[in-house]
Image: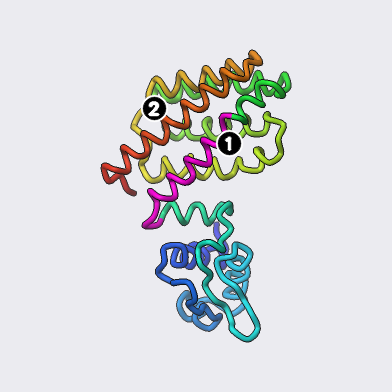
Amino acid sequence: MPTLHEEVLAKLGPLIVSGALEPGAKVNLEWVQQEFGVSRTVAREAVQVLASMRLVASRRRTGVTVLPADEWDSYDRAVIRWRLGGPDRDVHLHQLSELRTAIEPPAAALAARHADVRQRGRITELGAALETAGAAGDLAAFLEHDIAYHRLLLEASGNVMFAGLAHVVEEVLRGRTLHRLMPPRPKPEALRLHLVVAEAVAGRESEVARAAMTAICVEVADEMGRLGGNGARS
């Protein structure tokens, strides 16, 4: 169950990210208290979290001020989630897709070189689980397997910088499902490509893993563009 300050954050954060509270707007504690019906302590906690995300700046003389988008912590889970729920979803999804295309193919290639025995076995299991859940149209199970699959690839790369972006990929995957940017059943081609990557990692075929993961990223971007263009919204 969310705490009071988490409930305030879930309402106040999207107001900033959507532009309803524009850069330069003042968000003092009294306003937060009145707007959300909470104590000063809860209001302060919420503002402190927003400040840690760089959505607002708190200064002694000027108070709490909403910051422009280029100041935000774009890799924060909540900021990603709020952006995906906002009016600029398509733009943000495009940017996130570009990020995935930049990091996941080389991460898959590195995983083929550096994954240990357990990781090689696990990625093969997850590839098979994805195919089973996808063929059955079980999007809930597919999502959880997909998150585990992509997280494992990033971790198995042996590069801590890639592994540190696993939460970004997770938020993209969850956002695709939440905002109906997934087909009712994953395409057979996408399922096959996930198996190809898994088998390539297990077989230490780094360039095959790289090429297949590139194809996955391209297919995902195309599918989200098609569904988004058709007005798929939650």
Q: Residue at x 45, y 22 (%)?
A: 191
Measured in 3D between alpha carbons, the distance from the residue under mark 2 to the one under mark 1, in whole angstroms, is 22 Å
Residue found farthest to the bottom:
61
Instruction: Say what amino acid the circle numbered 2 marks.
Output: Pro
Crowding at mark 1 (Cα within 10 Å: few <14, some 14-19, many 20+): some
Given residues 67 and 174, the one toward you in this image is 67
Instruction: Say what amino acid the circle numbered 1 marks.
Output: Ile
Nearest to N terminus: mark 2 or mark 1? 1
Q: Quadrant of residue 103?
A: top right
Residue found farthest to the top:
203
- What kind of element bears circle 1? helix
| 80 to the left or right of 60 | left
- Is residue 173 visible in the rendered image? The answer is yes
Which SS type dominates the magenta stretch? helix
Q: On the rendered image, what quadrant is the N terminus found in? A: bottom right
Of discs 2 and 1, which sits in the foreground? 1
Magenta run includes residue 196: no
Q: Quadrant of residue 28?
A: bottom right
Q: Residue at x 66, y 26 (%)?
A: 110
The residues colored magenta run: 86-105
Crowding at mark 2 (Cα within 10 Å: few <14, some 14-19, many 20+): some
Given residues 117 and 17, the one toward you in this image is 17
Q: Residue 119: image x %, image y %?
A: 68, 24
Pointer 1 residue: 103
Task: Work out whether 98 lies above or below 210.
Answer: below
Q: Residue 214: image x %, image y %?
A: 50, 28
Q: Are marks 2 and 1 in contact (CB under 8 Å)?
A: no
Q: Residue 30: image x %, image y %?
A: 53, 83
- What kind of element bears circle 2? loop
